[in-house]
Image: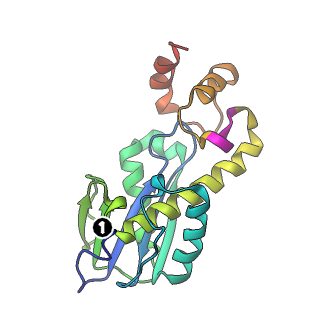
Amino acid sequence: MLKQYFDKQKIEAGCDEAGRGCLSGPVFAAAVILPKNFYHPLLNDSKQISEKSRYLLREVIEKEAISYSVSTVSCVEIDKINILNASILAMQKAIGELKTTPELLLIDGNRFKQYKDIEHKCIVGGDGKYASIAAASVLAKTYRDDYMLRIHEEFPQYSWDTNKGYATKKHQLAILKHGYTKYHRKSFTFKMQQMSLGF
């Protein structure tokens, strides 16, 4: 069962990102402040629940959260500052857009950069441990999936409707055949080509 809070006395925002390991599309991040007593039986790490459950949860989270925000960093910016820095920047942007200022940030993963003077805790596997981080993972994932479905209509040959930009065999073969789009991360190119040599 997910923990409802890290520190009951502080206003906590859970933060997580989606799309860090993709070959295309922005990285999305969300920040969520939940009521201390928030509970939903379906809530978990977004990777562990069905697509239907994620979208159901998104409605619940957006309705019941004290505050939430979703932000992005583009593939162009990812290429400039690298994916780790872009993921951190996306989370910081989401935190900055919250209508309620948090006193403690619960960050999924082991890397973050100090944001203003707000205390933060990095928690590996946090999206499977704390409700607010799990909620952030659900928002980041569903908003990013919606985005990838929209750009799939522009470039259907890359199958973003199913792979969401991840490095599936079909996606990599499509890149080899059709080249890169404005939505691809060019800094990931060499790694992708090395992976494709075995196909």
Q: Position of residue 26 (x, y in %)?
A: 54, 48
Q: How many marks?
A: 1
Please check the rendered image and state whether residue 72 is part of the magenta-colored stretch, yes or no: no
Q: Quadrant of the N terminus?
A: bottom left
Q: Quadrant of residue 163?
A: top right
Q: Vertically, is 7 above or below 31?
A: below
Disc 1 residue type (three-letter): Leu
- Quickly name the residue at label 1: 106
Position of residue 54 in the picture relative to residue 162 (left or right): left
Query: Which residues are the magenta region?
Result: 158-162
Secondary structure state at the residue bearing disc 1: strand
Q: Vertically, is 110 above or below 195?
A: below
Position of residue 35 in the picture relative to residue 73 (left or right): left
Residue sitting farthest toward the top = 198
Of residues 169 and 151, the one nearer the viewer is 169
Q: At x 50% / y 13%, what residue is drawn?
A: 198
Q: Count residues near mark 1 (Cα–Cα under 10 Å), then give few for <14, some for 14-19, many for 20+.
A: many
Q: Position of residue 95 (x, y in %)?
A: 40, 70
Q: Position of residue 119 (x, y in %)?
A: 23, 72
